Amino acid sequence: MPLNTPEPPGRIRDETRSQLGQIARASGDGPKLLGEIAPDDVEVSTPHRVYALLVRDIEAGGGLEAAQPVGWRFLLESGGNVLAGAEVSETPERTFPPTFYRGSSVGATATAVKAARALPQLQLAKFDLRLLRIPELYQMALWLHAPNTDLLIPLAPSPIGREGQVTPSPVFFRELAAHAQDYRAHQPPVWEPT
């Protein structure tokens, strides 16, 4: 079965494409997000829902069930090459304009998506492509979700290592729990009025 990339609701993809054209025209002679490629030659591809998880949820024994949806992400491609990424943040009240970016997370995502599409597990179940972000630990991972199975592929750089390796969620969270404890141990004390 192919890896499922769910379509975002509403006009999120169209608005991302529209904003991409505006950004490209506004860049003038400065650094260009797309290099020399015209916005019309760029595909807004590989949609995946973004979920966030907090350290306190991990410390409370929570796993993927505690992750909250916070937006959508796309890869911007031309001629089979990934040029950049785009992310649209959401709250229950509103959807924000897309943010465009380049950098190592774009390449790490593209590499992990390619590896995920070749996994033998995809022959057994239909997996949805998602992204899990744990901001306090600087951890991002592709999240392959099926009704009875969840697999994670940590993106570089990862505090637990395993970059690009398929990791069952119990192993991922066991290894991440130690980093969560280190994170809490190095936080300044909370001030309470006397």
Image (tube, helix red, strand yellow):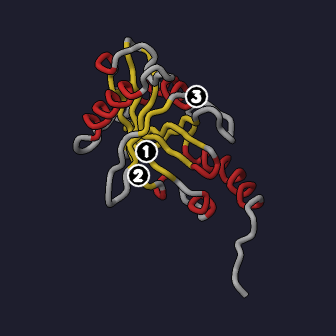
Q: Please state, as top left, top right, bottom left or bottom right, where the N terminus lies in the image.
A: top left
Q: Is residue 125 above or below residue 149?
A: above
Disc nearer the start of the sequence (3/2): 2
Q: Which residue is mark 1?
A: 50
Q: Are marks 3 and 2 in contact (CB under 8 Å)?
A: no
Q: Categorize mark 3 by other alpha carbons within 10 Å: few (<14), some (14-19), many (20+).
A: few
Disc nearer the start of the sequence (1/2): 1
Tell which of 144 and 121 is nearer to you: 144
Q: Which amino acid type is shown beneath numbered disc 1?
A: Val
Q: Residue at x 34, y 27 (%)?
A: 45
User: What is the distance, in whole Å, between disc 3 and disc 2 at their CAs?
Assistant: 23 Å
Kindly tell me whether residue 27 is visible in this rendering. yes
User: What is the distance, in whole Å, between disc 1 and disc 3 at their CAs?
Assistant: 17 Å
- In the rendered structure, find residue 69 and report the number of the disc placed on it: 2
Q: Could you tell me residue 16's position as x and y percent?
A: 32, 35
Q: Residue at x 56, y 61 (%)?
A: 57
Mark 1 against mark 3, which lies toward the viewer? Answer: 3
Q: Is residue 137 left or right of residue 7?
A: right
Q: Residue at x 51, y 28 (%)?
A: 102
Indicate the secondary structure of the residue bearing disc 1. strand
